[in-house]
Image (cartoon, grey):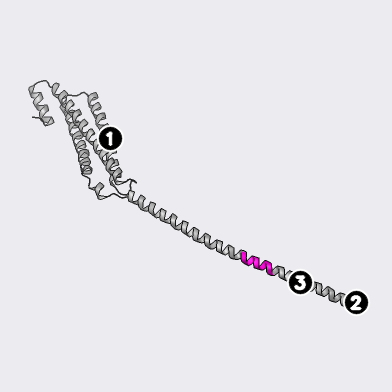
């Protein structure tokens, strides 16, 4: 009986020792988990700070780019008020007026065959086409929100358009003078020459 009691006591003591040992292990694991959670929390805080910093830098970078690109879409007074813009428009108007006037004069003169008049129209048509391209390019360069260009690029483009427009107008005038001389050279007599000069606005 005593042996049975002692055996039971020993078994119970061993069980309690096992429970105490398991409890100690559990406390140790819990302490480790707390340390891991603490490290994770610190790591997450560092991540959040780093992400926030990167996000802010990235946003700041985007804002800078946005301001820069928006600025490129704007047209400054230096571009808008450039005297070349008005000169190009004047040249375009002059080209249209002179083309219409002399195309009509050459038809009325009686100096040219139908094939020659058709050739004149083709030359005029090409000039008008090029002039329209210039007008479109000028509108794009001088209008806000059309193209992303710096002021220097816009001013360079305006100078190029002005040069092309000048060349076209000069060519038109040279072409018309040649045609007028050919018409006068074909006049039959003095009266015919006077009539043609009057038609062309010559003295």
Tag of residue 120: none
By secondary structure, the bulk of the magenta-drawn segment is best described as helix
Question: What residue sits right under mark 3 in the picture?
Answer: 19
From the top left corner, tell me how far across and down residue 2 is, in percent.
90, 79
- Residue at screen point 7% across, 22% down: 190
- Residue at screen point 23% across, 24% down: 116
- Which badge, 3 or 2, comes first in the chain's sequence? 2
Which segment did they paint magenta?
27-35
**Who is closer to the viewer here, 122 or 47?**
47
Q: Residues within 10 Å of mark 3 (few under 14, many from 20)?
A: few
Tag of residue 3: 2
Residue 164 included in the magenta stretch of the image: no
Mark 3 or mark 2, whichever is nearer to me: 2
- Which badge, 1 or 3, comes first in the chain's sequence? 3
Give the answer, above or below, for where 56 lies relative to 98. Answer: below
Q: CA distance from mark 1 to mark 2?
A: 121 Å
From the top left corner, tell me how far across and down residue 195 is, in percent.
10, 27
Question: What residue sits right under mark 1 in the picture?
Answer: 130
């Amino acid at each position: 009986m005593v042996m049975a009691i002692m055996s039971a006591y020993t078994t119970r003591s061993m069980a309690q020792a096992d429970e105490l040992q398991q409890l100690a292990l559990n406390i140790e694991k819990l302490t480790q988990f707390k340390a891991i959670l603490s490290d994770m929390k610190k790591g997450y805080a560092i991540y959040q700070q780093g992400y926030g910093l990167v996000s802010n830098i990235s946003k700041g970078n985007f804002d800078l780019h946005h301001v820069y690109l928006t600025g490129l879409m704007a047209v400054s007074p230096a571009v808008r008020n450039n005297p070349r813009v008005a000169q190009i428009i004047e040249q375009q108007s002059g080209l249209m007026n002179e083309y219409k006037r002399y195309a009509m004069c050459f038809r009325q003169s009686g100096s040219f065959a139908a094939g020659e008049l058709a050739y004149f129209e083709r030359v005029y048509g090409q000039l008008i086409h090029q002039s329209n391209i210039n007008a479109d390019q000028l509108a794009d360069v001088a209008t806000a929100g059309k193209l992303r260009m710096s002021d220097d690029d816009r001013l360079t483009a305006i100078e190029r358009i002005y040069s092309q427009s000048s060349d076209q107008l000069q060519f038109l005038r040279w072409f018309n003078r040649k045609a007028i001389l050919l018409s006068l050279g074909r006049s039959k007599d003095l009266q015919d020459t006077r009539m043609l000069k009057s038609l062309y606005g010559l003295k």
